[in-house]
Image: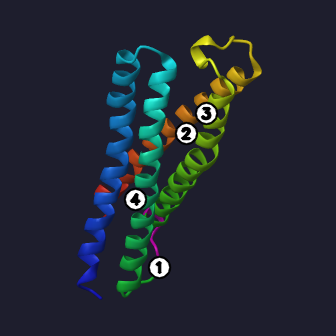
Amino acid sequence: MRNLLPLSAILEIIAITIWVGGMAALAFIAAPAIFQSEPSRAKAGKTFGLMLRRFHWVAYGCGAVILLAGGLRRAGSFNHRLSAPELTRYVIAVLMLGLSLYSGLVISRRLDGLRKKMTGGIDLTSKDDPNRIEFNNLHRLSTTLMAFNLLLGLALAVMFALED
């Protein structure tokens, strides 16, 4: 079991890196490029939405790997008690996973449903249309959750790097 401890730490840092790096790449590279190059917001939103739906599955997997690797490291150590920084790290990972699940399973589905109701697309839907208002509010919430998750992920990576 002790031989699995370094492997679990490696898996955990790889999962943190993929999750945080993926969020940063989507937010700072993919989204601006897509919304700049597509002819309409509707087309850009559809393309980015597809990327985000696929990335949610990556996030779920990374969250699971982080928690399983941490559990494996705890089970393989002689001291089964988590230190305060370790506990904080795993609470952050659970929070990030919960936010990703909510964003991917609840918000994304509601956005897709609203997109279908706006038959002419968001660009041609009146700004005071209730569907567009709800869509814009959910989009803001989705963006806020991703930004918050990115900050939590950066904190998680720093805490892992500073672990004794």
Q: Is residue 14 left or right of residue 136?
A: left
Q: Secondary structure at mark 2?
A: helix
Q: Nearer the viewer, residue 162 or 157?
A: 157
- Which of marks 2 and 1 precedes in the sequence? 1
Q: Quadrant of the N terminus?
A: bottom left
- Which of marks 3 and 4 precedes in the sequence? 4
Residue 44 lies within the magenta run: no
Please report the bounds of the magenta region as a residue range: 81-85
Q: Is residue 22 left or right of residue 139?
A: left
- Which of marks 4 and 1 precedes in the sequence? 4
Local packing at callout 4 (Cα closer than 10 Å; few below 14, some 14-19, many 20+) is: many
Q: Secondary structure at mark 3?
A: helix
Q: Nearer the viewer, residue 80 or 43?
A: 43
Q: Position of residue 117 (x, y in %)?
A: 69, 28
Marks counted in the figure total: 4
Please say if the residues under marks 3 and 2 sit with CB atoms less than 8 Å apart. Answer: yes
Amino acid on which the number 1 mark rests in the picture: Arg
Q: Quadrant of the C terminus?
A: bottom left
Whether residue 110 is visible here, answered yes or no, is yes
